[in-house]
Amino acid sequence: MHQDVKSILVSEEEIKEITTTLGQRITNDYKGSDKPLVVIVILKGSMPFASDLIRHIDMPLEIEFMKVSSYGAGTKTSGEIKIHLDLNREHLENYNLLIVEDIVDSGRTLQRLTQLLKNRNANCVKTCTLLDKPSRREVDFVPDYAGKSIPDEFVIGYGLDYNEKYRNLPYVGILKSEVYS
Ligand code: PRP
């Protein structure tokens, strides 16, 4: 795997700093709330990040999983989101929801997912991403918590894949172009 990496973009050490800092910020922001915090892990990519992040959130929380995909701008289903695995929970008005993602690219997935959960009466829906690619944004979406803004490179590792591989790299790297071209 490692020989396919052109360079390391976010090292293990930096990932540790990011998860620590974000965890502290989230703890401070939510600890006074009278509603329980539910962390929604978006499969598959956010699994390693969410797993580290929750261990730096120093307050009670619950975990849920969702798997979703958004349609591209050119399709007639634009504005929709496909749910492959849904929340197993009702009465969302009773919880603070925090959606955890590995990367925000066009912004469509998180924009639509946030809207979907608000439509289900959740009164507080926030988003946390490890990586943000603002230069790729196609919709007006800003994550509430973002670990690192990155340039428009093909990134893999720490949950991010190319053809389902490289998710288990302990760092985020840039994939050599000869691997995918
Ligand atoms: C990735 C990522 C986000 C989405 C971001 O998921 O985890 O869910 O794409 O892109 P967007 O901002 O353009 O909507 P992917 O569909 O690759 O699934 P995976 O996490 O299972 O790899």
Image (spheres, grey):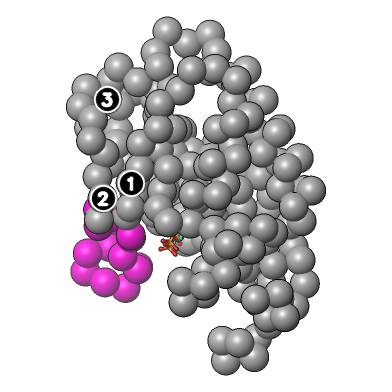
Do we see residue 169 in this rendering? yes
Q: Which residues are magenta?
A: 69-83
| Numbered badge on residue 66 | 1
User: Magenta region, mostly helix, strand or loop?
Assistant: loop
In the image, taking residue 94 as reference, residue 90 lies left or right, namely left
Instruction: Indicate which disc, 3 or 2, sits on the residue closer to the N terminus.
Output: 2
Residue type indicated by callout 2: Leu
Residue 87 appears in which quarter of the rendering?
Answer: top left
Screen quadrant of the N terminus? bottom right
Q: Which residue is mark 2?
A: 85
Residue 64, above or below 168: above
Q: Residue at x 27, y 62 (%)?
A: 78
Check if mark 1's residue and mark 2's residue have beta carbons within 8 Å: yes
In the depicted structure, whether residue 128 falls above or below residue 133: above
Q: Quadrant of ligand 1?
A: bottom left
> For numbered disc 1, what is the local secondary structure?
strand
**The C terminus, quarter of image:** bottom right
Nearest to the observer: residue 141 or residue 181: 181
Numbered-mark total: 3
Counting residues from the N terminus, which is met first, the one under dot 1 or under dot 3?
Answer: 1
Q: Earlier in the sequence, mark 1 or mark 2?
A: 1
* Image position, residue 10 (x, y; %): 73, 57
Q: Which quadrant of the figure has residue 116?
A: top left
Report if residue 12 lies within the magenta region. Answer: no
| Disc number lying in front (1 or 3) | 1
Image coordinates of residue 161 in percent, x first then y, are 52, 68
For label 2, the crowd category at 10 Å Cα-Cα, with few meaning under 14, some 14 to 19 and many 20 or more, is few
Q: Which residue is mark 3?
A: 92
Q: Nearer the viewer, mark 3 or mark 2?
A: 2
The CA distance from mark 1 to mark 2 is 5 Å
* Closer to the camera in the image, 81 or 165: 165
Q: Amino acid at mark 1?
A: Met
